[in-house]
Amino acid sequence: MNSELLNTLSLPFKNVNLLPFKYIEIISKMYYKEITSAQNPLIKQILVLKEKSRERKKTGQFLIEGKRELSLAIKGGYTIETLLYFPELFSKSEASAMSQHNIEIIEISKDVFQKLAHRDTTEGVIAVVKAKDHKLEDLNFKSKNPLILVAEAPEKPGNIGALLRTADAANVDAVIIANPKSDLYNPNIIRSSVGCVFTSDIAMVSSKEAIDFLNTYNFNIFAAILQESEPYHTQNYTLPTAIVVGTEATGLTQEWRDAATQNISIPMKGVIDSMNVSVAAGILIFEAKRQRNFK
């Protein structure tokens, strides 16, 4: 980076390697239209964004790979800030079309693309995207008797992604992640959800906040636990309903057990007494959808 140009910007950082991501983004929009080196400071910063949850939280940004995920994010109302593309896989005409939406477009080399890509089949396109806040007040219910999936403290990205796919398949009104332990924009969650992280209304709050919210709007809370529970198929899910699942290791905390309108369980006929949390959630949610005539 030309030091004289940096001086004209009146930035508090003269060493480009120490520039925070927002400043690097500004500089990239002024100078970088093509990047061929993985040692470029912008690329280094994007790598940190890809690999570090703390950086994603600090900047309020994350990465998307692939055309499908990109289109779903746009459909979900996300703001695409910067798009990086490898022209052998993603055409310049496609990139030019994106630039009409005030998106900064940067062509990258094969080496840079391979450095940034989280998986092999990303169709030559990577985007820096602005994260959402995921507040309860931003939830937008689609029906008068909403159906919500609540997951308490899920940790494994694969499970979170599978839960979001299940929620999308059932077209639930919202997903609440209570006491979240994982970064929602972890690349493995985005990948395992096949982009459903962008298509669902999601709130990430404490269990207390979630319970207070559900009580305020008169939801029936069905807590999936084995103890002191009724078979899930004997319950009525046609009123405002929240189905709550816990972790496979410890289940739901006492806080949710105490808050539940009814504890429910899936009759187990095999040797083990538990199943994958996303499978259990799917069984419960689709019973609720069946009772609602899949509406």
Image (cartoon, rainbow, N blue to C red):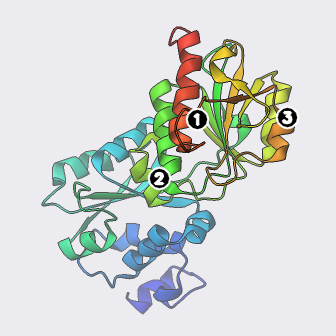
Q: CA distance from mark 1 to mark 2?
A: 19 Å
| Badge 2 element | helix
- Report whether 213 appears left or right of 83: right
Tell me the quadrant of the picture where the N terminus can be found.
Answer: bottom left
Is disc 1 in contact with disc 2, using a CB cutoff of under 8 Å? Answer: no
Using the rendered view, name the quadrant where residue 259 is placed.
Answer: top right
Crowd rating for badge 3 (residues with CA inside 10 Å; few <14, some 14–19, many 20+): some
Q: Which residue is mark 1?
A: 201
Check disc 1 and give the amino acid type.
Asp
Check disc 2 and give the amino acid type.
Gly
Q: Please say whether residue 19 is visible from this viewpoint.
A: yes
- Report whether 179 appears left or right of 133: right
Q: Which residue is mark 3?
A: 259
Q: Which residue is mark 2?
A: 158
First of labels 3, 2 by sequence position: 2
- Report whether 194 appears left or right of 277: left
| Badge 1 element | loop
Residue in view at x 82 percent, y 25 percent:
261
First of labels 3, 1 by sequence position: 1
Residue in view at x 78 percent, y 48 percent:
253
Point out the residue furthest to the front here: 271
Eye-nearest disc, 3 or 1:
3
Point out the residue furthest to the left here: 88
First of labels 1, 2 by sequence position: 2
Is 156 or 92 nearer to us in this picture?
156
Residue 147: where, in percent of width, then height? 64, 23
Q: CA distance from mark 3 to mark 2?
A: 28 Å
